[in-house]
Image (cartoon, coloured by chain):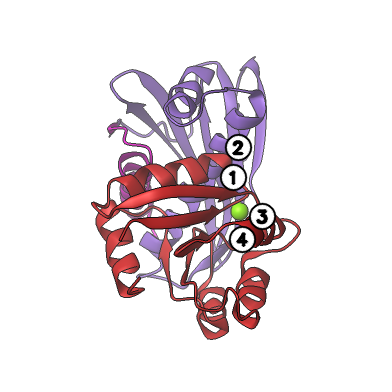
Chain colours: A red, B purple
Amino acid sequence: MAIRALIVDDSITIRMVVERILTQTGLDFEKCLHAGDGAEALKVLGSNKVDLILSDINMPNIDGLELVRRLKSDPATAEIPILMISTEGTETTLEQALSLGAAGYVKKPFTPETLAAAIEKCEL
Amino acid sequence: MDAEFITEKIIAATNEVFETMLFMAVEPSEPLGDGQIKDRIDFSAYIGISGKINGIVGVHCRVALVEAITSTLTESESEDELIDAWAEIVNMVAGNLKTHISSQVDTFELSVPTVIAGHEFRIVNRGSKSSFPRIILPFVADDEYVFYVDVLYCNQ
Ligand SMILES: [Mg+2]
């Protein structure tokens, strides 16, 4: 199955880096959508169906934790696996994301292999 | 923590960020220690660290390196994008340094990054003779672009 992914990060650099690493995982990506924060992600998800969300934690407007909370409480998006991508994420923040329903997390920097393993755990 | 230990961790953390996230090979060279960075700098990004270790992590470079990084990622190269890239790089270097150091001592937290973008300014190091030792490590990315990772720290 070709995967449709949504990358959510307030840094365009990181969105592009994540997209480039995704293409090197060996997994089949149909397309990568981008959103600059949680609010934009909700807007994108209103009109696009995706199989996987990769999200930053620290973002303006709606941050990563709040995004997970909202997506998990909406039946239309509750089933989409969300992987948190973080640098500075403290263990407690990452644990919080998992307890809210995130499928997992990867810490920057990461290799295509690490990202592929985290995605495979999501059982898309 | 001695300077040798921190130096080793800076090298490991920086290598990983550039090699895995930016697909650039980097080579460290001898630490500059208390000396000044003699090169002119165009981009300087800083992030504060606090916890068991307090201090600042900085990365400094010429604009050519940031342009080389962003040109492989996006079509436009606005100053905003260059600043964004350099802020994310200091964030990843400092975050990864924390990951590398945290197996040995308790962790520290990171502040938000600040980027200084200008044209040929000079970074002058002050205060390194106080209780904050400073390590400045020059690196060369892709055999071409010199940059510096600059860590000023004190153990609590
Ligand atoms: Mg962010």
Residue receiving disc 3: A37
Highlighted range, magenta: B1-26
Q: Residues within 10 Å of mark 4 (few under 14, many from 20)?
A: some
Q: Could you say whether the residue bearing mark 1 is in a helix, strand or loop?
A: loop
Q: Which mark is residue A45?
A: 4
Of B27 and A110, which appears nearest the observer?
A110
Tell me how far mark 1 sits from mark 4, CA to CA: 19 Å
> Is B31 contained in the magenta span?
no
- The subunit carrying tag 2 is B
The span from disc 1 to disc 3 (Cα, nearest Å) is 9 Å
Residue at numbered disc 1:
A11
The nearer-to-camera label among 2 and 3 is 3
| Measured Cα–Cα span from mark 2 to mark 3 | 15 Å
Give the residue at mark 2: B84
Q: Is residue A10 left or right of residue A24?
A: right
- Element assignment for label 4: helix
The answer to whether the beta carbon of the residue marked 1 is less than 8 Å from any atom of ligand 1 is yes
Camera-side residue: A58 or B63? Answer: A58
**Three-letter code for the amino acid on which mark 2 is drawn:** Asp
Q: Say if labels 1 and 2 share a chain.
A: no
Quadrant of the drawing holding the C terminus of chain A: bottom left
Q: Extreme bottom residue here?
A: A99
From what the image shows, is residue B144 above or below residue B141? above
